Image (tube, rainbow, N blue to C red):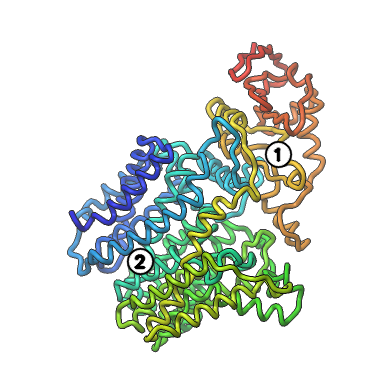
Amino acid sequence: MTRWLPALTVALAVAVTLVALGTDIFDIAAYAAYSALGVVLPGTLLYRALRRDPHSLVEDLAFGTAVGLIAETAVLALCRPALWAWPVLVVILLRRRLSAPEYPHRPSRAWSWSVAAVALAFIGYLTWAFLRVNAPVPTGRPRWYMIDQLNLLAIAGDLAHHFPLAVPELGDEGLGYHWFAYAHLAAAENLSGVDLPVLWFRLDLPALAALAVVLLAVAAWRVTGRAWAGPVAAALMYAVGEAGFPARAPAFFGSITAYYTWSSRSVLYASALTMPLIAVLAQVLRREHTTRTWPLLVLLAAGVAGAKSTVLPVALAGLLCAGPRRAWRPIAVLAGVQALAVGLLYGTDGGGLTWSPFGIMADFAHGRPAVIAAGLGAYAFALGARLAGAVAIERWGPVERFLGGAALAGLTAAVVIWHNAWGQHFFAIAGFPFGAILSARGLLRAGRGRVPIAGVIGAAVVSLLALFAVVPHVRRPWDAVFPVYLFGALVLVAALATRTRAAALTVVLFAGGAGLPYDAAHHANLGTAYHVLVTPEQAAGARWLRAHSSPEEYVATNAHRIGTGAQAGLSLSYWISAFSERRVLLGSWGYSPESARIQSQRRRIGPVAQYWDPARLEANDRAIYEPTPERLRWLWDRRVRWIVVDRAQGRESPRLADQATRAWSAGDVVIYRLRPPGQRAVQVSVAGAELVPE
């Protein structure tokens, strides 16, 4: 029983936190049951059937959970009615795998508690930076929501009812996207019965965080053969931030864990699936595989490709560094899966990615070589300090070259590729776990299997100084990178003050310990930048629509833009599709493939301002502001059965009430139900209640 105590401690801490945040205990229990019976159990049995030899129980459970997530997505996409049945079917077919084999390895208590500590630190960051400041549904008062969160919540809601995926605010316009993380949420809603916003803003994120930490710890153990590489690698990725004064970090750096792990659910989901992929590829490079390894590799590669489009390219680069002659078969597998993913998932338009060396520095370098060189040095130190353990690697075999090549490819791609929404940073994030494993291996080699206490103390001192130091400003553009070099000097002094190479290396690796606490304290939820206020009436109207409509019924709306002032020009209003799980015929177009393509061609940041089909937009809006039977029929012929009017964006024509049934209203939100063409509707004006047509 004591061996389960670290895992139970993490689970209890998460449960207490969720209850403290107002989460219904029955929702917590339902999600836990879904995770255990619908993902972990069938996934573990599948993994046991595909892996070569047993290693440890923690590997079977962790890697099995990753396999379960991928299998769940495949069932949702290919045979949705079997979503309830597939776990039962797997258990029946693989019931002989229920008996645990004799495991040759068992993690020590210290290892388990160390991994648990990293998981708790990471979940603590996510709680303070995201969970505590986001209500699943706004009640009582308007709430700020990051625009991206509502858009991604809408994608998950669309996948809960439809396949293939479409842009939720643009009717039937297909969406080429890495959508597996959102399919997981859709499956979780269908199987657990927990409301999707509760899954999104409460339950799923801490569960994925704990899973990602354990997966990286197990993968590092398997790849390096050293158990303690696991907690070190997990800490480097999920508990330590970038090297620098966090108050003066240049925006173009991006980050690995801060912000991205909560703002984009696909980042954390893809990171989790990447870990077993790394472990299996390392087995293949060492020629420790069997024929059953190849189906497992294909499955993991497919899951990673569907989770994030940036992972397989950096993994392929790493395999090329390992040596094409040795790695040609896994190269062929990954290249084939990537080609299928481009054809079936992403599309061939590039998603707004373009070739642009040093484009991430364009806002301050302005093409000046000296400034670009200084920026590259600062970028390499800030993001690469945690990977410095690689310098202690003495023998660079195929696995080491694979790990180092993938990490370097990710950082390089982020520097030479440009994206209109800064998506190039996802390449650096994709390559980081490869580098974290390699760096942990190097540190343990330098420290002869241990992490020096003197180095940990030195890193803690540097982190504290980074939190409270006041850094002077210098003349632009050098002010963007000067704090990084100043911090580098501080790290150098602290490293030289230690007595051993291993201690000095520890200082460098963990010098960014202040990054995540500072981000949680000062930039929780990114403040209100790039956010939108959602009123209780808006959320209530959308949820009423969800309860009284079918997924096949589309919605028309006049809500295309958000906010006032500078934000008024942004077509990024997603509250209808996010909280109703219904497709909107023509709502907002800012987050769509066509918008990304247009802005990429124009070399502009952010969404396109004007809709590219003004005639269609005019037809949609005139049906609301100047309704006629013909214009409403135009909506009806496009499967629209509901009109949601946000009077803050414009008041509908009084004639609309003569031609459609006003079904619900509160505040500025009015919902009309279209009647079949030619049928007359009787209006009964009762706010907040369903109205019955004649």
In which quarter of the view is residue 326 placed?
A: bottom left
Screen quadrant of the N terminus: bottom left
In which quarter of the view is residue 176 placed?
A: bottom right
Q: Is residue 669 left or right of residue 114?
A: right
The relative height of residue 19 versus residue 651 in the rendered view (above or below) is below
What is the number of the mark on residue 140? none
Whole-percent x, y for residue 368 in the image: 75, 78
- Residues at marks 2 and 1 touching, judged by CB atoms closer than 8 Å: no
Whole-percent x, y for residue 58 in the image: 28, 61
What is the number of the mark on residue 217? 2
Residue at screen point 66% across, 27% down = 669
- Name the kind of residue labelled 1 in the image: Leu
Whole-percent x, y for residue 153 in the image: 55, 44
Comparing 54 with 133, the one in front is: 133
- Name the kind of residue labelled 2 in the image: Ala
What is the number of the mark on residue 586? 1
Whole-percent x, y for residue 324 in the image: 48, 82
Q: Is residue 595 left or right of residue 391?
A: right
Residue at screen point 69% across, 60% down = 420
Between disc 2 and disc 1, the foreground one is 2
The relative height of residue 401 versus residue 97 in the rendered view (above or below) is below
Disc 2 versus disc 1: distance between alpha carbons?
45 Å
Q: Secondary structure at mark 1?
A: loop
The answer, for residue 130, to whether it is visible in the render is yes
The answer, for residue 412, to whether it is visible in the render is no
